[in-house]
Amino acid sequence: MVSRIEHPAGGYKKLFETCEELNEPISAVVVGVIPEWLSGSLLRLGPGMFEIGAEPFYHLFDGQALMHKFDLKNGHVTYYRKFVKTDSYVRAMTEKRVVITEFGTAAYPDPCKNIFSRFFTYFRGIEVTDNCLVSVYPVGEDFYACTETNYITKVDPDTLETLKRVDLCDYLSINGVTAHPHIENDGTVYNIGNCFGKNMSLAYNIVKIPPTQKDKTDPIAKSEVIVQLPSSERFKPSYVHSFGMTENYFVFVETPVKINLLKFLTAWSIWGTNYMDCFQSNETMGTWFHLATKDPAKYIEHKFRTSAFNLFHHINSYEDNGFIVVDLCTWKGHEFVYNYLYLANLRENWEEVKQAATRAPQPEVRRYVLPKDVHKEAQGKNLISLQYTTATAVMRSDGTIWLEPEVLFSGPRQAFEFPQINYNRFCGKDYSFAYGLGLNHFIPDRICKLNVKTKETWVWQEPDSYPSEPIFVQTPNSAEEDDGVLLSIVVNPGADQRPGFLLILDARDLTEIARAEVEAIMPVTFHGMYKP
Ligand SMILES: CCCCCCCCCCCCCCCC(=O)OC/C=C(C)/C=C/C=C(C)/C=C/C1=C(C)CCCC1(C)C
Ligand SMILES: [Fe+2]
C-alpha cells in the first residue's frame, strides 16, 4: 500500500490553487461504462479560494468552502461547483479582505474604519468561523455543510444554493461538533463536541438529533446532549475530529493534542491570533480511551490508557464477545500533525515536501481492543481473549488498563487516511474492508483498500494523479461487503485535455470501471457523501 510514484513535476500544487465556481453544470466525457444502477450525486467539500485579494490564507483548513457535485444518471455525468455563501465568504467578498479569523489565518480590523469603530469591533471579540469546508451530511430531509464549530450551513443538494446558517448553540450546550457524525439507518444523528461549561468546567458532550419528525418540524429543534465525558485536564480539552460507535457503545479517544482554553478565550480579544495558536501538546498524558453506553447513555468509568498519538479518523468499531474492537488511523507521538499542513509547506517542491514529512508524526493503522468487563483481580494479565488479534489490555496496579495495539498497516510516511467502509451495512459491526486515500508524505496519490482481518491490500494509482477520499456505494441487493463501487475525484494537472475526473472503481479489487472527465481542475476536497 505504499506509493510507487514520485512527484518531481509538483502537480499536487494545483490542489491548493483558487478556482472559480461554475454558472451551470458541465457535461463530462465518460470513458468506460457506468453501472445503470448508479444514479445519484457525489457531494464533496473543500477549500476553493486560498486568498482574498492580496491577503493569503495560510493553512490548509482556511480557504473558503467550495461545494462540488457530480451527478450520475443513465450513464451520463455532469459536474457543478459553488462557493457556500457563508458569513465568512460573503463578508470577505464585500469588504475584499479576510474578515473572519480562520483555522490558521487571523483577520485584522478594517483599516478604513476610524479609531472609535475599530475600538468597538475589538471589544465585540473575534467571531467564530462558519466556513463549512470540511463535509456535508443529512439531517432529516435536509443537508448541512459543516466545519467543526457551532455553525452548520443548510444547502440545497440539487442547486448547491446556500439556504441558511444554523447556530447549534441555540439548541445545545456545545462549543462545536465534529464533521464526522454517525448516522443510523433511520436517520438518527449522533455527534460529539467540546463544551466549555459554566465555571470553566470542561466536558465532551455527545449529542443526538432525532430522525425526520412526523409533524415535519426541524429535527435540530429536538436535539439534545445525551451524555457527558470528562476531560483529562481541567482547562485543556483535547481536539476531537471523530468518534466511534458500535451497536451499544460510543468510543471517544482523548489525545494529547490540547486546546489551551485560557489562551483560546483570551486570544479572542487579541488581534492576530488564530485557532492554530491555541493548541499545545501534553507530553506526559499519552492517550486515553473513554466508553459510554448508548441506551441508556451513560459514561463508563474504566481508565483505558495507551501511548501518545494524534487521531483524526476512526475507521470502524464493533463489539465481539465482551470486547470492543476499535480501528483507527493514528499518527504516532504528541506533536500536532496540523503543524505540517500550512499551505506554504504543501506547495513546496517535491524534495522539500518529502523532507518536511520526515520530521512529522508517522502514520499507522491500528486496532485497539477494550474489554467491556474489567475485574481488579486480573492485574498484570492480558484481558483480551479474542483469538484473531494480537492487541492487548493489561490491568495495572493503579487500576488503569494499558492498551497495546495490533498494527493493521504501517509504511514510512505512507498514510492510509480518510478511511471509508460499507457504512450503511457495517458501521458498528464486525467487518472486513476499509478503503482509504493514500498519502505519500502528505500528498494524496493513490486509493487503497485494506482487509482488516487478513491485512491484504489493494492499490489504484496513476502517475501525476491526485485522488480524493474514496466513497463506497453498495451494489443494490448485493450480499458481499465489498460488492460496490468507490467514487473519487481525481486531478491530473499535466493532462492535455480534461484534467479533472470522477473515478469509479470496483471496490472488490480497485480495478477501474469508468471515469467521467471534465475540463476543470478541482482543488483538494476533504469529505463528502453519496446521495442516491
Ligand atoms: C485530502 C488530502 C489533503 C492533503 C493533506 C492531508 C494530510 C492529512 C493528515 C491527517 C488527516 C487530517 C484530516 C483532517 C481532515 C479535515 O477535514 O480537517 C479539516 C478541519 C477543520 C477545518 C477544522 C476546523 C476547526 C475549528 C475551526 C475548530 C474550532 C474550535 C476549537 C479549535 C476549539 C473549540 C471551539 C471551536 C470553535 C469548535
Ligand atoms: Fe475528517
Image (cartoon, rainbow, N blue to C red):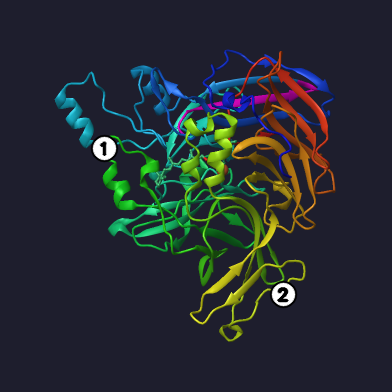
Would residue 347 appear left or right of 203 to someone viewing this image? Answer: right
Q: Please, which residue is most extreme toward the left here?
A: 116
| Circle nearer the viewer, 1 or 2 | 2
Please give the residue where the numbered disc 2 appears in the rendered image: 385
| Few, some or many residues within 10 Å of mark 2 (<14, 14–19, 20+) | some
Q: Residue at x 73, y 28 (%)?
A: 463
Relative to 6, is 408 above or below?
Answer: below
Q: Position of residue 122 (x, y in %)?
A: 22, 34
Q: What is the three-letter code of the residue carrying label 1? A: Gly
- The tally of labels here is 2
Q: What is the three-letter code of the residue carrying label 2? A: Ser
**Residues under labels 1 and 2: Cα distance?**
54 Å
Please give the residue where the numbered disc 1 appears in the rendered image: 125
Range of magenta residues? 62-76
Q: Residue at x 55, y 34 (%)?
A: 352
Would residue 362 appear left or right of 494 to someone viewing this image? Answer: left
Taking the magenta stretch, the answer to whether it contains residue 304 is: no
Q: Residue at x 24, y 21 (%)?
A: 111
Quadrant of the image for the N terminus?
Answer: top right
